[in-house]
Image (tube, rainbow, N blue to C red):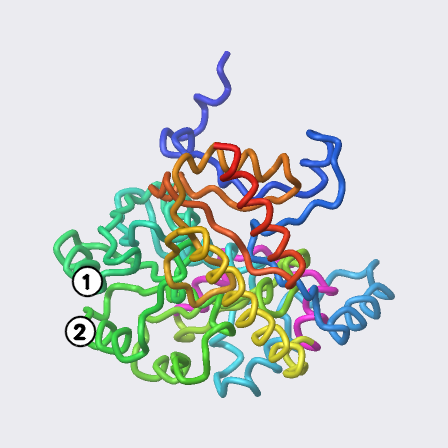
């Protein structure tokens, strides 16, 4: 008997998410050391020392279940953003929150709009509940908001996913453009605004999306502690929205989906503004280093506002493999309909230099 046939057809059709290759896996494959991983948009500084200390302290209560309501972390977020406790839902990383939104509001036959070249989990979360995804053509590798709104209205979509900045292209939508989009969109279409890379935006480009929640009850804002806060391994994120919307997401959330160490570390991380500032500055310098290096090699890159950059290169799959053999892990993005591109995360100065040196060597072998 083929037991896979017991699963619904839309589950069998899912192509599982492929994460960036771990260092340990490459070590096993090639037997090399000194590997630099620039594939998963992680913080090269690691986590805030305050967050690490808080996580270690939480180990004393490892035998107890975590606070299923996440009161302390929600309270910290309430003080930071001025929302209410019942407007916040915590997730096992922001991926969990994207799936909670889908599970709470979508069913077989519903339609969801997202952009070409946008985060793969939008399509996966949609498909996992039997809904139908509508991928709208990108504009300069970014979201075409007018086209997305038109598609959503004409197709009777129930939800729209938007990433800002977008992954894997790094493109950015201004606050004015997003506010106009929300103002003109019918209120019965939910919008999940994924701001995983929000902390990497320069001050002059930031906008207060949280304040929009007072007027746009169909808005869900998703954020994470995995990127600028450096807590990727602990899996912790949060979403903010209308209390009724959040209530539905909490109804499908696992009772203890965020562990105690993650909650404690996130509370401490929120208080460490100096660490986030250091992360931002390191990323700014590293972005300049990598983009200038790519330009010197005659390679075109997509202007990015995240902690990564995608660049165009001939024979991307071959170059990716050569970089692995040279001890550098980047991310192929052919599954994003970008077969001629690779994405590299911004690392420490020495890591960035190793990537550029290895890329030059890989290109020289052609």
Choose the circle earlier in sequence order: 2 or 1: 1
User: Which residue appears at 48% of the width and 36% of the height?
Assistant: 16
Could you tell me residue 248's position as x and y percent? 43, 63
Magenta span includes 260: yes
- Residue 204: percent from the left, percent from the top? 40, 84
Question: Could you say where residue 10 lies in the image, as x and y percent from the top left?
Answer: 36, 34
Asked if residue 114 lies left or right of residue 53, the reply is: left
Which residues fall within the magenta stretch?
245-268
Are the residues flagged by discs 2 and 1 in contact, CB closer than 8 Å? yes
Looking at the picture, does residue 232 appear above or below residue 366? below
In terms of depth relative to the viewer, which is nearer, 103 or 29? 29
**Relative depth, front residue between 109 and 236:** 236
Going 60% across and 41% down the picture, which residue do you hit?
Answer: 21
The one nearer the camera, 50 or 334, is 334
Left or right: 16 with respect to 106?
A: right
Q: Which residue is mark 2?
A: 184
Reading the image, the residue beneath label 1 is 149
Figure quadrant of residue 159: bottom left
Disc 1 secondary structure class: helix
Is 83 located above or below residue 91 in the figure? below
User: Around disc 2, counting alpha carbons within 10 Å, would you say few (fewer than 14), some (14 to 19), or many (20 or more)?
Assistant: few
């Amino acid at each position: 008997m083929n037991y896979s046939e017991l699963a619904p057809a839309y589950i069998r059709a899912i192509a599982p998410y492929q994460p960036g290759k771990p260092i340990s896996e490459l070590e096993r494959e090639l037997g090399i050391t000194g590997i630099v991983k620039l594939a998963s948009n992680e913080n090269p500084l690691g986590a805030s020392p305050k967050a690490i200390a808080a996580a270690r302290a939480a180990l004393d209560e490892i035998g107890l279940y975590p606070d299923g309501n996440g009161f302390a972390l929600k309270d910290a977020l309430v003080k930071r953003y001025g929302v209410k406790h019942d407007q916040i839902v915590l997730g096992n990383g922001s991926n969990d929150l994207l799936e909670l939104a889908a599970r709470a509001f979508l069913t077989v036959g519903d339609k969801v709009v997202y952009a070409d070249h946008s985060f793969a989990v939008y399509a996966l979360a949609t498909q996992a509940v039997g809904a139908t995804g509508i991928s709208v053509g990108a504009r300069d590798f970014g979201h075409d908001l007018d086209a997305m709104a038109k598609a959503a209205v004409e197709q009777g979509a129930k939800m729209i996913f938007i990433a800002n900045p977008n992954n894997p292209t790094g493109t950015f939508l201004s606050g004015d453009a997003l506010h106009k989009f929300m103002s003109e969109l019918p209120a019965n279409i939910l919008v999940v605004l994924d701001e995983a890379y929000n902390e990497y935006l320069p001050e002059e480009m930031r906008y207060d999306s949280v304040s929009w929640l007072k007027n746009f009850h169909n808005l869900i804002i998703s954020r994470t502690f995995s990127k600028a806060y450096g807590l990727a391994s602990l899996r912790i994120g949060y979403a903010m929205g209308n209390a009724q919307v959040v209530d539905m997401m909490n109804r499908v959330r696992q009772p203890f989906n965020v562990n105690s160490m993650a909650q404690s570390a996130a509370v401490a991380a929120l208080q460490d503004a100096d660490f986030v500032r250091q992360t931002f500055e390191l990323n700014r310098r590293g972005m300049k280093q990598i983009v200038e290096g790519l330009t010197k090699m005659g390679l075109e890159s997509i202007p990015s506002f995240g902690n990564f950059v995608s660049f165009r290169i001939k024979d991307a799959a071959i170059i990716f493999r050569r970089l692995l053999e040279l001890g550098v892990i980047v991310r192929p993005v052919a599954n994003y309909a970008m077969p001629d591109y690779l994405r590299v995360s911004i690392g420490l100065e020495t890591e960035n230099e190793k990537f550029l040196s290895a890329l030059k060597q890989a290109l020289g072998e052609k």
